[in-house]
Image (cartoon, helix red, strand yellow):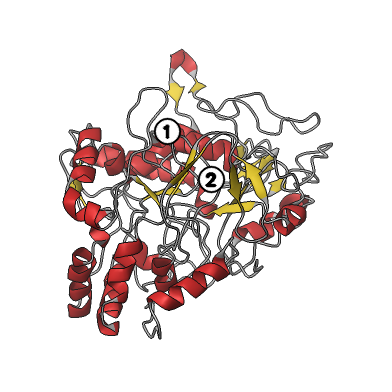
Amino acid sequence: MYSTGGVIAHKGWMYLAMALATVIPGMAQNDPGPRPGAAGAGGPFAGLNANEKAAFAAARATFQEVDSVSGSLPGEAGAGLGPTFNGNSCAQCHAQPAAGGTSPAPFSPQVPVPNPQVALATLDGANNSVPPFISSNGPVREVRFIAVDPTNRNSPLDGGVHALYTIRGRKDAPGCNLAQPNFGFQLANDNLSFRIPTPTFGLGLVENTPDAALQANLAANSSQKQALGISGRFNTSGNDGTITRFGWKAQNKSLLVFAGEAYNVEQGVSNEGFGNERSAVAGCIFNATPEDHTTIGPGGATIPSDVNEFAVFMRLSAPPAPVTQTQSQSNGQSLFNSIGCALCHSPSLTTAASPFTGMGNFTYHPYSDFALHHMGANLADGVEQGGAGPDEFRTAPLWGLGQRLFFLHDGRTSNLLTAILAHFDNGGQCTTLQRQDTFSDDTNGNVYQAQANSRFCGSEANAVIHGFSNLSRSQQQDILNFLRSL
């Protein structure tokens, strides 16, 4: 069943609700909700020198620029929007609780604005309809199709992003007739997988964490992890074999790749990392490519591209600041560790030497191991990215969670307790699907042909969620309070 209210719609959600009722009967705990007060994020890393902080400020301004097709519209000086797009500014989607964060919403204590994707549908004369899974109160979303043809049981898998909107009808895109995808058809056939924006605060620390440190952290406490059914592995780059760590499935290697992909996929701006237009149909191409590029000035002086500036903004940003803990929050932190949450949501990691002041050999607190873990059929999205399978996701960093408005990769809920319980899955033993085997949609029985070996397992978090269920209600509330302090 799908909801148009923005809190979603997921295959097998009703089955999950019934399963959870057996895990934690009579739930009376309450999510404290997004924390009010200052954002505690969005600024430069505290140890930077004056020149580095100035570079951060300039990069943040670029991150906030608004794009139009050719940069000719008032207030929309950035160029390259389209032919398809989900947003027209990085900061439009990465807004909560400050520029660089995640999806905004009207109920934010810091940035109380409606989902900007609603107004974007017809901005500047664009001829788009708002898809039924986008709402003013719901999260910013990108959408992927699971299968190429959801009506064909032998259809190959898709997995790609299909942008919400096109530039058709915009006053700066005369002659473009590119239509939107038929989202109603895809929705009726349960063929959609959603993603919400990931926060970008503190990511320079993540980028500069050595592979060896991540590997040692994953190997730590191995007996305790094994007893709880936790394993995990890293997604890696097909180019150099090193650990990739950005994105919901840790599919991107670096902040430069992360920024370049997003600029091309989310805003339709071709760039030095992704130099070709998506949906490059006749009548809808208005600029030379790459649209975003390093500018060469007099005497060979260069001005960095937007993508490079986006990466600088993320690389030099400060991590989110937690609040001073109450006794309940302190109790919750101890319980978070004792029941095994911290085995995947690792509290601390340390960077390598850094060219940026104060960021080298720095211990930070992301609450993530940046590894992939099997999360079971209830969270599986049918999408493979890099080495990540359809039910594998990178451990979501929890720093800054206290001010997030939507949870899980698809933004299906605004309730932290619901998000915790969604980690539970009655799946069972791991199975490997061969190329000619099948992947089944839990809701309506549609079956898709797998295009490569895919491994499905029950959730690695099952035992931890059982541990959570065995706590008293006040102890469970302490964990919720702790998480909202981050």
Q: Which residue type carries mark 1? A: Leu
Residue 358, visible in the rendered structure: yes
Q: Which mark is residue 75?
A: none
Q: Quadrant of the C terminus?
A: bottom left
Residue nearer the viewer, 332 or 229: 229
Residue 163 visible in the picture: no
> Looking at the picture, does residue 240 appear above or below residue 299?
below
Give x and y (percent) for residue 97: 42, 62
Classify 10 Å Cα crowding around label 1: few (below 14), some (14-19), many (20 and above).
Answer: many
Which image quadrant is residue 269 in? Answer: top right
Whichever of callouts 1 and 2 sits on the residue coming sooner in the sequence is 2
Q: Residue at x 27, y 73 (%)?
A: 479
Q: Which residue is mark 1?
A: 256
Q: Residue at x 43, y 19 (%)?
A: 301
Give the residue drawn at x 32%, y 75%.
469
- Looking at the picture, tell me which residue is in the foreground, 477 or 120: 477
3D distance between C-alphas at marks 1 and 2: 18 Å
- Give the secondary structure at mark 1: helix
Depth check, front residue: 51 or 233: 233
The residue mark sitting in front, 1 or 2, is: 1
Q: Is residue 3 above or below residue 71?
A: below
Q: Decide: is 158 above or below 31.
A: above
Three-letter residue code for mark 2: Glu
Residue to which mark 2 is pinned: 65
Give the percent coordinates (x, y) of residue 413. Answer: 50, 68
Measured as percent of width and height from the top left, residue 476 is found at 29, 77
| Secondary structure under the numbered disc 2 in the rendered image | loop
Q: Quadrant of residue 23?
A: bottom left
* In this rendering, position of residue 390 left or right of residue 73: left
Give the answer, above or below, for where 143 lies relative to 479. Answer: above
